[in-house]
Image (tube, grey):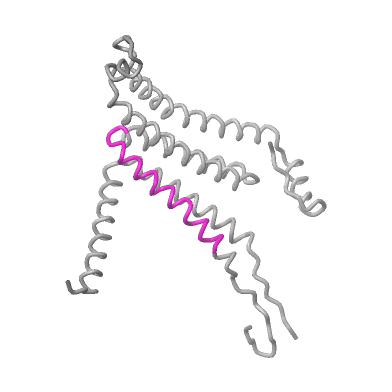
């Protein structure tokens, strides 16, 4: 309690839940940034020349979309961070798979199946995985940016001054926020 | 082996200085990392702004 002259006031201080929410707001993007930097350097030249620009474009694209559509700001930011996190985890998983499979030759496959196999069959599987890595690397950011651009166009097309005022009035009468789909 | 707190503290500080220098070098050599850092900072600011706007700090007179 604080005592002001000729008045006794009660001031609610920050609770543990408030502090935890603030901590989550800071830690989640920072940890994701550190995770992204570590992954970029694990991939060496591929990471610094391809992953770094694509992750940067995804992140900035999500932030710009959140700024352009304020009613969906939190959901867009959460979606951006989760997409980047899953993207990084997928790339690490595919890289680990390639490392595992690069030690397997077609002779090993022949001995496992106890029958002749085409010589190129066993050796190109790691090549398919490398192609998968390239496709995942490029298509995920392109798909994400396309999705955010579509959201912005849909919001701009559907929204106008009248609808925005209705949305704001909705807080007073319905106590619900209107989300554009 | 004698446990010396000053050595532990010194090595901890040296490790952190090395890490900060490495990060500064990495960011200076690859400009795209600045874009990622800008996105991260913008995300933190937007989350914090949202929390500050929605948190309630009551203050009322008792008497």
Q: Main structural element of the magenta stretch: helix, strand or loop? A: helix
Compare residues A176 and A70 and report the one nearer the observer: A176
| Coordinates of residue A134 in the picture (x, y in percent) | 38, 25
**Residue positioned 29% across, 51% down in the render:** B23
Residue A26 in magenta stretch: yes
Compare residues A92 and A24 and report the one nearer the observer: A92
Q: Tell me: A123 left or right of A75.
A: left
**Residue positioned 59% across, 61% down in the render:** B52
Q: Tell me: A143 left or right of A103.
A: right
Q: Examine the image and state in which quarter residue B50 appears.
A: bottom right
Q: In this view, does A150 lie above or below B52?
A: above
| Coordinates of residue A145 in the picture (x, y in percent) | 51, 32
The single residue placed furthest to the left in the displayed view is B1
- Magenta range: A20-46
The single residue placed furthest to the bottom in the displayed view is A6
Q: Examine the image and state in which quarter residue B61 appears.
A: bottom right
**Residue positioned 73% across, 83% down in the render:** B62
């Amino acid at each position: 309690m604080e005592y002001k002259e000729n008045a006794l006031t009660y001031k609610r201080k920050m609770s543990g839940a408030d502090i935890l929410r603030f901590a989550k707001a800071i830690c989640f993007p920072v940890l994701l940034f550190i995770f992204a930097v570590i992954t970029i350097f694990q991939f060496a030249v591929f990471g610094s020349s391809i992953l770094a620009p694509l992750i940067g474009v995804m992140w900035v694209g999500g932030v710009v979309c959140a700024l352009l559509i304020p009613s969906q700001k939190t959901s867009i930011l959460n979606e951006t961070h989760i997409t980047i996190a899953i993207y990084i985890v997928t790339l690490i998983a595919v890289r680990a798979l390639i490392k595992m499979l690069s030690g397997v030759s077609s002779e090993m496959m022949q001995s496992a199946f106890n029958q002749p196999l085409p010589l190129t069959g066993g050796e190109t599987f790691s090549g398919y995985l490398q192609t998968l890595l390239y496709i995942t690397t490029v298509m995920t950011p392109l798909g994400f940016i396309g999705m955010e651009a579509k959201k912005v166009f849909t919001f701009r097309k559907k929204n106008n001054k009248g609808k925005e005022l209705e949305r704001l009035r909705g807080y007073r009468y319905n106590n619900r926020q209107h989300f554009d789909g | 082996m004698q446990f010396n707190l000053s050595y532990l503290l010194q090595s901890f500080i040296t490790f952190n200085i090395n890490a900060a220098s490495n990060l500064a070098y990495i960011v200076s050599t690859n400009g795209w990392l600045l874009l990622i850092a800008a996105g991260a900072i913008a995300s933190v600011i937007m989350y914090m702004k949202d929390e500050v706007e929605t948190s309630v700090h009551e203050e009322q007179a008792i008497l």
